[in-house]
Every structure is written in structure tokens, then in C-alpha cells.
Image (spheres, rainbow, N blue to C red):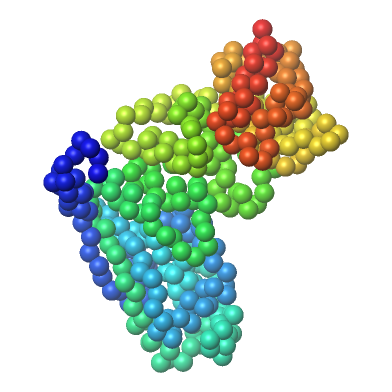
């Protein structure tokens, strides 16, 4: 127990937080949930729908579990001001049911109904659709119940956020950025939406064209934007785990009651100019998006995105960014040469690679390009 607190004070601190959380539990039939979804009384956010990655076999086995009356984990809902419920945890389960019913919409369009496959307890179900089920099984499915834990709108927003941040989301593991996107909205969605919008910037998208499809699906493009702002604005606070550091920065910026001030207009200008410069340099060198790629033995960059090259170049550029004139071809050529020679310079390469996410290596790779760009502009 902290030495400055008495036992009574510690108990009171816990009790105060308990009273700030208002919850209730309901048992809903899946038919009720489908009706609520159709009437927009149950909201599944589009960001959640993009996370819907259960295979058709996994979806089918969930439907099979309902028909067999097997227990399923509860879902978690948040009550909005207008009494509408928003799904926070349970996407895979609810979407699987709606998919089987032929009532799931993604981006405003109906998804073709699920045909059951890979059912391993009752393989006779394979090939069935909702429309082809015997009436008795259709009714059985509609009347299947699931427990819903509902966080009332009167609850403290910060505690709602931390509650859902700690949920085990089940199904396929979500990336760190997907979890951040899903939960941070319970504090405030402005910064999250800001990053989502910036991810569509043409210069940025060209710079990260070498990202794999898997990385894009897991919102790694948005995580790179978070990484950019977190290290640019709060890098001195980074000590150990990068994922935790970025999450804490996003929380700090997003918390309406926090002390951080984020100048959206200014930061947007900085971001856009940074990637305008990097894109221009990639074109000058004839490398295109490979300008942020790993280096091959032949001294040419590969079609393989490198977070460490990204950090060194875009963060190392910040001290001189305001001085860069994109219309000065000689100046841009000097900056291009600084990147070309720097990517294979031993003083830089010893700060990158496996196990180089520590604070000192990060500082060294950013510092190397900061010094290189400063010399190029002197």
C-alpha cells in the first residue's frame, strides 16, 4: 500500500471509481439483436466492420454452436446519449449471425448470405443457408440468447475507455492500432479521425506503397502516423515499450480533460510538407516509395518498407523542415544525396535492424539524419 495513504483512504479511492461506472446486464435473443441492427438501434461502427475477419468456417461453427445451445461469451455494449447501443466487443459473433441471415451490411452494401461450411460437430449442416434451414432450426436460432453487458451513458467516460481497452476481444487477434482505433473513441474521436484522414494523403500513401496488404489491413499506415506525431512531439518521454508509449500518447492527446494541446492545423501542415519532401526526394533518386525501404547488397533500396528508415528520415527532417524549399532544385538534390549516402552509412546502419527499438538506437538514427540534413542545407 502506498505509504502516503491510509487503508481507509485507499478503500475510498476504489469505491469512488466503482460508483462512477454504471452498468446493467440484459439477455437478448439474436432475433432481437437483428431487429435492433435493422432499425439502427444497435450500431456497429464501420471501423469495426473492417475488422471483421473471421473465416467463413469460423462463422459457420459459431452458428453451429448456437444451434447446439453451446455457451457463448457475452457481448459488450455502450449506451449512447440517445439510448442507442453501440457494439464495442462481440463483433465476430454478431456479424456472423447477421451474415448467416443475409442482413450484414459493409460500406452500405449487403454481404451475400453465408453458406455453412466446416461445421465439425454436425457436418450435416454444411451447405445449409438460413433460407434452407428447417423451420424448427430457424426458430431455434432466432431464440438463441446471448448475455449483453451494457455500460450506461451516465458512466465516467475515462472509466468506460479503460474498461473496454482491457477487454479480451476474442476471435482473431487485433493489431495494436486496431485496438487503439476501437477504444479511443470512448475518450474523444478527433485525433483518431485526424489520423484516419491523414492516411489518405497522396504523398504519404506513395511513401508507404511498399507496405504489405496484411500491414494495411491491420491499420499499420495509421500507426505510422501515430508514431510520427508521438516521437516528434513527445519522443523525450519514450523509455521502454513502443506500443505502450504510442498508446499513452494517443490517450493523452485524445483525453478532453488532459493537459496536452494538439494544434491540428499546424500539425497537418507539418505532416503534409514532410511527405511532400520525401516523395519528391524519392522521385529525384528514381527510387519512388523505395526511399523508405530496406537496402540491398547492391546499394539499391528494396521494395520492403522499413520502420527504422522511416523514423530516421521523416523525424530527422523535422529540425530543418521549415527551411526546405521544394522549388529549389539544388537544395532538393543535396537532401536527396544526404538520404542516398545516409541509408548505407555505418553510423546509421548500426542503429537499425532486429532489437534496435531501444531509446538509444532511436535517438541515434534520428540524430544521424538530422545532422545530415542540417549539413545539406548549410
- Which quadrant of the figure contains the N terminus? top left
- Which quadrant of the figure contains the C terminus? top right
Q: Residue furthest left?
A: 8
Camera sees residue 329: no
Residue 350 at what x, y percent from top left?
70, 29
Q: Residue at x 57, y 88 (%)?
A: 123
Along the line of sight, the residue nearer the viewer: 41 or 310: 310
Can you tell which quarter of the image residue 167 is in? bottom left
**Residue 107 versus residue 378 in the image, above or below:** below
Residue 276 at what x, y percent from top left?
63, 27
Along the line of sight, the residue nearer the viewer: 371 or 36: 371
Q: Residue at x 49, y 28 (%)?
A: 235
Q: Residue at x 23, y 60 (%)?
A: 23
Residue 52 at what x, y percent from top left?
51, 62
Is 116 situated left or right of 2 in this image? right
Can you tell which quarter of the image residue 281 is in? top right
Amino acid at each position: 500500500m502506498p505509504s502516503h495513504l491510509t487503508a481507509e483512504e485507499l478503500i475510498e479511492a476504489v469505491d469512488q471509481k466503482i460508483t462512477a461506472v454504471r452498468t446493467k446486464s440484459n439477455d437478448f435473443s439474436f432475433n432481437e439483436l437483428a431487429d435492433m441492427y435493422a432499425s439502427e438501434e444497435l450500431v456497429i461502427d464501420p471501423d469495426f466492420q473492417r475488422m471483421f475477419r473471421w473465416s467463413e468456417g469460423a462463422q459457420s461453427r459459431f452458428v453451429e454452436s448456437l444451434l447446439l445451445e453451446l455457451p457463448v461469451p457475452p457481448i459488450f455494449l455502450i449506451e449512447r446519449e440517445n439510448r442507442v447501443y453501440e457494439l464495442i466487443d462481440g463483433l465476430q459473433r454478431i456479424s456472423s449471425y447477421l451474415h448467416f441471415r443475409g442482413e450484414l451490411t459493409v460500406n452500405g452494401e449487403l454481404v451475400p448470405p453465408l453458406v455453412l461450411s466446416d461445421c465439425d460437430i454436425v457436418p450435416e449442416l454444411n451447405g445449409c443457408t438460413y433460407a434452407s434451414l428447417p423451420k424448427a432450426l430457424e426458430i431455434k436460432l432466432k431464440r438463441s440468447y446471448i448475455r449483453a453487458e451494457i455500460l450506461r451513458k451516465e458512466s465516467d467516460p475515462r472509466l468506460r475507455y479503460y474498461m473496454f481497452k482491457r477487454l479480451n476481444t476474442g476471435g482473431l487477434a487485433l493489431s495494436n492500432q486496431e485496438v487503439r482505433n476501437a477504444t479511443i473513441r470512448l475518450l474523444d474521436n478527433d485525433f483518431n479521425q485526424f489520423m484516419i484522414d491523414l492516411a489518405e494523403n497522396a504523398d504519404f500513401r506513395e511513401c508507404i506503397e511498399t507496405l504489405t496488404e496484411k500491414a494495411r489491413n491491420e491499420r499499420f499506415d495509421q500507426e505510422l502516423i501515430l508514431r510520427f506525431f508521438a516521437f516528434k512531439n513527445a519522443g523525450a518521454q519514450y523509455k521502454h515499450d513502443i506500443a505502450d508509449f504510442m498508446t499513452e500518447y494517443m490517450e493523452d492527446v485524445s483525453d478532453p480533460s488532459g493537459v496536452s494541446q494538439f494544434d491540428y492545423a499546424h500539425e497537418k501542415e507539418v505532416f503534409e510538407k514532410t511527405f511532400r519532401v520525401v516523395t519528391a526526394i524519392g522521385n529525384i533518386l528514381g527510387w519512388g516509395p523505395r526511399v523508405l525501404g530496406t537496402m540491398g547488397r547492391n546499394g539499391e533500396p528494396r521494395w520492403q518498407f522499413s520502420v527504422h528508415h522511416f523514423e530516421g528520415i521523416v523525424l530527422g527532417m523535422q529540425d530543418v523542415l521549415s527551411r526546405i524549399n521544394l522549388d529549389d532544385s539544388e537544395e532538393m538534390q543535396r537532401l536527396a544525396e544526404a538520404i542516398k549516402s545516409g541509408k548505407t552509412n555505418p553510423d546509421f546502419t548500426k542503429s537499425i535492424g532486429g532489437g534496435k527499438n531501444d531509446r538509444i538506437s532511436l535517438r541515434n538514427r534520428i540524430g544521424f539524419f538530422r545532422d545530415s540534413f542540417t549539413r545539406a542545407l548549410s
